[in-house]
Amino acid sequence: MKGSTHLAIGVVIGAAAACYYPFDLKHAAYYVTVAGFSALSPDLDGNNLLSAKLGKLSRLIRRGALGLSALAMAVAAYLLIAGKQADPKLVLFAVPVFLLMLVAGNGAIRNALVSLCGGGLLYAGFRDQLDWLVGFGIYVAWAPWLAHRGMTHTIWATALWGWIGLGLERYLGVPGIAMTAVVGYASHLVADTLTPSGVKWLFPLYGKSIKLRVF
């Protein structure tokens, strides 16, 4: 299912939460943001709306690194041909980077950028002694390297997300944030269950995809 569809479902859930709980404009913004983000988060294990911009950045980084390392190798080769001494550091930098960029695809670089964001959240959580933020950072750093519709699309990940949401609710002092986060996250799994590929809700205990046909 498309990310825009998941986001739309999340926004509806957030709006419903804003109507259900005592209305406050700032709280309503929290509900919609949390639900929308939660509805997209399971797809951090692949290229989705949350990481699309990082996908473009990863392509720029890969092309730039390839170009700079190739230029550095060309300069080193020219210096050797001209009988001049090339700085060993130039070669030690250029060759590994060039080979790494040839092997690494744009997806791997994108995943590394997402993990870097997770690392920042993890650091902030440790710094401010916020367990839920540490958990959030671990999730963001770990998710990109998982198989698509794997561990992030399970009931266990939903429970973890609920724990993160509960910590955020206590931090913000806004009732219903945890429930909104869980419902938003679960909505993604339910929606994907309606697709032909289904969802492995109980992975790794039960490895088969669960599918529901509504028509």
Image (cartoon, grey):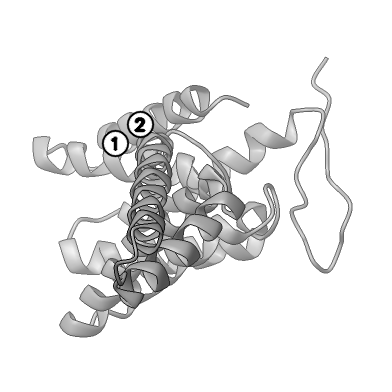
Q: Position of residue 148 (x, y in %)?
A: 67, 48
Query: Could you tell whether 135 is left or right of 42 in the image?
Result: left
Identify whether 114 is placed above or below 89: above
Please identify the quarter of the rendering in which residue 58 is found: top left
Which residue, given by chain and number where applicable, does mark 1 sit on?
32
Residue lying at the far top of the rendered structure: 215
Query: Could you tell whether 206 is left or right of 76 in the image?
Result: right
| Nearer-the-camera pick, 205 or 14 | 205
| Nearer-the-camera pick, 49 or 196 | 49
Instruction: Give how far apart the Cα atoms at labels 1 and 2 are.
Output: 9 Å
Please identify the quarter of the rendering in which residue 174 is found: bottom left
Q: Circle 1 sits in a helix, a strand or a loop, which is it?
A: helix
Can residue 61 be spotted in the picture? Answer: yes
Earlier sequence position, callout 1 versus callout 2: 2
Task: Look at label 2 and name its amino acid.
Answer: Ala
Q: Circle 2 sits in a helix, a strand or a loop, which is it?
A: helix
Q: Are marks 1 and 2 in contact (CB under 8 Å)?
A: no
Which residue, given by chain and number where applicable, does mark 2 sit on?
16
Q: Position of residue 68 (x, y in %)?
A: 33, 49
Q: Position of residue 173 (x, y in %)?
A: 16, 62
Identify whether 88 is placed above or below 44: below
| Nearer-the-camera pick, 93 or 46 | 93
Q: Is the residue marked by circle 1 packed among few (<14), some (14-19), or many (20+) residues within 10 Å? A: many
Residue lying at the far front of the rendered structure: 83
Residue, x 32% and y 46% (percent of image)?
34
Task: Look at label 1 and name its amino acid.
Answer: Val
Residue, x 69% and y 48% (percent of image)?
149
